Amino acid sequence: MDSGEENDIVCLDESFFINDNYQIARFTFGSQILELYCLQSASTDFDLTGQMVWPGAELLNNYLSKNSDILRGCSVIELGSGVGITGILCSRFCGEVVMTDHNDEVLKILTRNIELDDSSKNSACSAKLKSAKLEWGNSEQLDDILQRHPEGFDLVLGADICFQQASVPLLFHTVKRLLDVGLKKKCRFILGYVSRAKVMDDMVIGEASRHGLRITEVAGTRAEIRNLGGVIYEITCP
C-alpha cells in the first residue's frame, strides 16, 4: 500500500454510529400509561437495537398487562431490557425488578428511563427498579447479579431478544442458570417472541430443548404486531 492509499483510509470514531437524540414517547398497556425516552429507529450500529421499542416488547407488555396476577409480589429479572419498557411495566405490580443489558450505550438510556420513572409524580410503582450489565454467557457478570440476589428470581423475562443466531445458545445458557439458582424452584422464563426467519424459529425451540428446558406456547397468544407474527413462550425446567 503506498502513502496515497494510506491517506485515503478514514478512521471513524464509534460516536459516528450512535444516535442519542432520544424523545419521550407514551405507551398504553391496559390501565398503565408509560412514558420513556427512546428512538423511533435504531442507530446505524446493529448492536444498538436496544435504543428503541420493538414489536416483541409490545406483545409481551400486552400479555403481562392482561395477566398482571402472575407479576404480583414477584421478583423479576429481564434480559435484553433495552430502554426498559417491559421492566417499567412490571414494576407496577412486582416486588423487585432487575433490568439488564450488555451494551453500555443502551444502559445509559435505561438508567435515564429509570430516573424518569422514579421522578414521575404519577408513578404508582411498588417496586424499586434496578439496572445491571449482563452479557449472555458472561459468568462473572451473572455471578455478580446472583450474589446480590442469592434467592434467585420468580420470573425471567425477555422481549424480542432473538436476533442473532450466535446469541441464542448463550441466551439459553444464561436462562438455564437463572432457572436453576437459589430457592426459586418454580422460576419460569416468559419470552415475547416475534418470528422473522424460520431458522430462528427452529433455533429457539431447539436450544431450549438442548439445554434441558421445556418450552410451551402460551395458548391464545399468537398475534400479528406491526405486520409480524408473534407468540408468548413459557420456558421452565422439567
Image: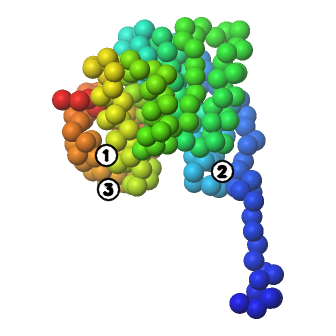
Please indicate, yes or no, whether residue 13 appears anywhere in the rendered image.
yes
Question: Could you say which is closer to the camera, residue 108 or residue 25?
Answer: 108
Task: Tell me how far mark 1 sits from mark 3, CA to CA.
Answer: 9 Å
The x and y percentages for residue 202 are: 27, 50
Residue that appears at 70% across and 14% down: 120
Q: Kindly identify which residue carries mark 3.
A: 199
Nearest to N terminus: mark 2 or mark 3: 2
The x and y percentages for residue 38 are: 66, 35
Q: Kindly identify which residue carries mark 2.
A: 43
Q: Which mark is residue 204?
A: 1
Per the image, label 2 sits on a secondary structure element best described as loop
Amino acid type at image mark 1: Val
Residue that appears at 59% across and 8% down: 124
| Residue 27 in which image quadrant | top right
| Residue 146 in which image quadrant | top left
Task: Tell me how far mark 2 sits from mark 3, CA to CA.
Answer: 25 Å
Q: Which class describes the residues within 10 Å of circle 1: few (<14), some (14-19), or many (20+)?
A: some
| Residue 66 in which image quadrant | top left
Residue that appears at 23% across and 46% down: 210
Q: Which class describes the residues within 10 Å of circle 3: few (<14), some (14-19), or many (20+)?
A: few
Answer with left or right where residue 68 lies relative to residue 46. Answer: left
The x and y percentages for residue 114 are: 64, 23
Per the image, label 3 sits on a secondary structure element best described as helix
Per the image, label 1 sits on a secondary structure element best described as helix
Residue projecting furthest to the left: 238
Q: Which class describes the residues within 10 Å of circle 2: few (<14), some (14-19), or many (20+)?
A: some
Answer with left or right where residue 234 lies relative to residue 2. Answer: left
Answer with left or right where residue 107 lies relative to residue 207. Answer: right
